[in-house]
Amino acid sequence: MSVALAGTAPATFEIKSAQLPLVALMLKSSDLNRLAEEFAQRFGDMPDFFDHDPLVIDLHPLNVAEANALPDFGALQTLLRQYRLTPLAVRGGTVEQTALAMAAGLTPTPDASVQRTAPVLAPTEIATSPEPVPMPAQPEPIPGALVIDKPLRSGQQVYARGRDLVVMAMVNPGAEVIADGHIHVYAPLRGKAIAGARGNADARIFALSMAPELISIAGIYRTSEVALPESVQGKTAQVRLVPGTDGGDDKLVIDAIGH
């Protein structure tokens, strides 16, 4: 027989479990000067890209690249706050690294999980499909996809925070389209396109005429310094990210659509 027992709850507070969405910085180098340069290159012209997002610093990649490195966590936090990031925690560090991070005010979170994301700002090769692929079904845009009806001129930038971006007109050279989700360009794409801007490795880029200055998914990017193959240059195509094998870097893959 079950028995219900009366209890007394505090009148002024309750303590419950909570989940906090975090941005993860996969730190790959202790060279903060280089990190500052690359942050400036990636986010320098987007001062509002982050909105005081809480952040966990993941040291696993650092310990693969630089075993037992001891970053200056105070300087690292100062750098991150300049870009409206709020460092809260650290994971994946050695005993010495964790002690330094705690001394700088960070909380160790060994049980925090990080979704699969591609290495940040690592150039990669781009592959092409050996054979044409059939037109795939367009993925359903998440609610509230941002739709742009007018051509984007050089110097213009559009960012779809937390959603997909649909562009119905040309993205001219010098223009930049950014989305946390997918990017659909139903016209020539000749500027820059950055999908999965906050680490969504499943994001894709679609264009009726693929001729970009730069394409990027979850931090993996490719510039126009190396021309696209003729099989996809100026053609209807999609760009996606494929996980690397045996611990290798993820790769951008571009597929012609309907050819």
Image (spheres, rainbow, N blue to C red):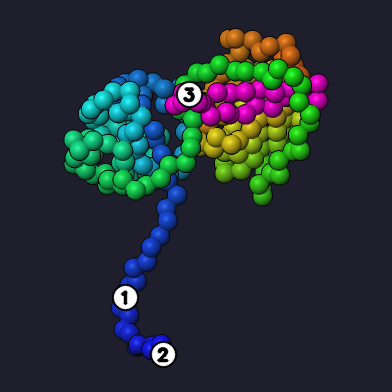
Q: Quadrant of residue 159?
A: top right
| Residue drawn at the location 58% of the way across and 10% of the way down | 225
Q: Residues within 10 Å of mark 2 (few under 14, many from 20)?
A: few
Please tell me whether mark 2 sits on a helix, a strand or a loop. loop
Disc 1 packing (10 Å; few <14; some 14–19; many ≥20): few
Visible residue check, residue 84: no
| Pointer 1 or 2: first along the chain | 2
Q: How far apart are marks 3 and 2 (CA)?
A: 59 Å
Tell me the magenta residue range: 236-259
Query: Which quadrant of the view contains residue 163?
Result: top right
Query: Of the residues shown, which amino acid type is indicated by label 3?
Result: Asp
Residue bearing mark 2? 1
> Relative to 88, is 25 above or below?
above
Could you tell me which quadrant the C terminus lies in? top right
The crowd level at tag 3 (other Cα within 10 Å; few <14, some 14-19, many 20+) is some
Name the N-terminal-most of marks 3 and 1. 1
Give the image location of residue 16, x and y in percent: 37, 66
Residue picked out by circle 1 = 12
Judge left or right: residue 11 versus residue 113: left
Image coordinates of residue 10 in percent, x first then y, are 30, 78
